[in-house]
Image (cartoon, grey):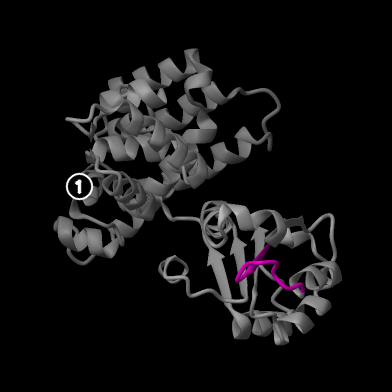
Amino acid sequence: MNELKARHFKPIYYLMGDESYYIDKISDWIAENVLQPEERDFNQTILFGSDVNASQIADVARRYPMMAEYQVVIVKEAQNIKNVEPLEKYLKQPMPTTILVMCHKNGKIDGRKQGYVKAIRDAGVLFESVKLKERDLLFFIERYLKAKGATIDPKSTQLIADFIGSDLSRLTSELDKVLLSLPEQDKRVTPQVVEDQIGVSKDFNGFELRDAIVNRNVYKANLIIKYFDENPKAGSIYAFLPLLFNYFQNLMIAHYCPQKNSQEALAEWLELRNPWAAREYVTGMKNYTAMKVLQIIGKIREMDAKSKGLDNPNTGPGELMKELIFFILH
């Protein structure tokens, strides 16, 4: 993005990967900023990989711009292009006045097409957009809000991450909605703001359920499960299982940390971004032995299979969740 903003353009930008957010951000910037508005009618072309073949794309890319320095060709759904040989041939001698942007979502170039990959790298930029890991998601939320002049506390960050997940397009949309609600003189995101604007309850949510389980608070855990059983639209086993699995998976790793009583050492051991995030693992090791954690992981996998219908003809998600929580806490 720094190179683009400095107008150091390449003949080809191949944007691929499972995270569509960054692919859209880069291609949208190119579409909106390379050409002046009055230049776009004749010099900006949007194509779809399901409608054109590689030869047609190469032909369009070979055109000269009309009364402009560049022409921009953006190919969406590039993953649908089958025979890429004509494009590979074009990229060996690309037009210096063409900026070709290929948007390949939900995957990447077939590893066997090494000549095509080399041609892209030699001519321009091959960018892979990967899904954020859970530990990076919290940092993304904090950084995104900070760039907009707002702050957020750790609990609110976790609430948003747990409720929305790693779909960055949806996540940034929700964060923008939160930002619009904040008064100019107080740009702090709190659990109450999250509840009001995003709809996730600060008292009944996956974060609070995990906190109750970490602290072995039987009453609170069952209260939350009862709430979700009575309000299935607010949450379900399908949302909570990955959350609990990730926690107990990390807790098993934490049991083997050489300095397990140090939050700083434990955070480094678990590759967490800050020592604050290690507190729940210090507490968890006090409440759950390594053997119990191993049994819980096995039970979570069993419930995951049953929630998908394996060896489970008629037990509903609510009952499965109650069974899992009882097993964990007793």
Which residue is more in the foreground, 321 or 84? 84
Q: Residue 79: percent from the left, percent from the top? A: 73, 61
Q: Which residue is mark 1?
A: 279
Residue found at x 76% / y 81%:
90
Up-down relation of residue 63 to residue 150 (above or below): below
User: Is residue 76 something that shows in the picture?
Assistant: no
Reply yes or no: does residue 73 show up in magenta: yes
* Quadrant, the C terminus: top left
Label the magenta part by its dominant secondary structure.
Answer: loop
User: Residue 3 lies in what quarter of the image?
Assistant: bottom left
Residue 89 forms part of the magenta stretch: no
Res 85 quadrant in image: bottom right
Region of the chain picked out in magenta, as a range: 63-74
Residue 153 shown left or right of residue 118 in the figure:
left
Amino acid type for the residue under numbered disc 1? Arg
Q: Nearer the viewer, residue 189 or 294?
A: 189
Q: Position of residue 226 (x, y in %)?
A: 42, 16
Residue at 72% across, 80% down = 116
Residue drawn at (27%, 57%), measured in percent from left and top? 273
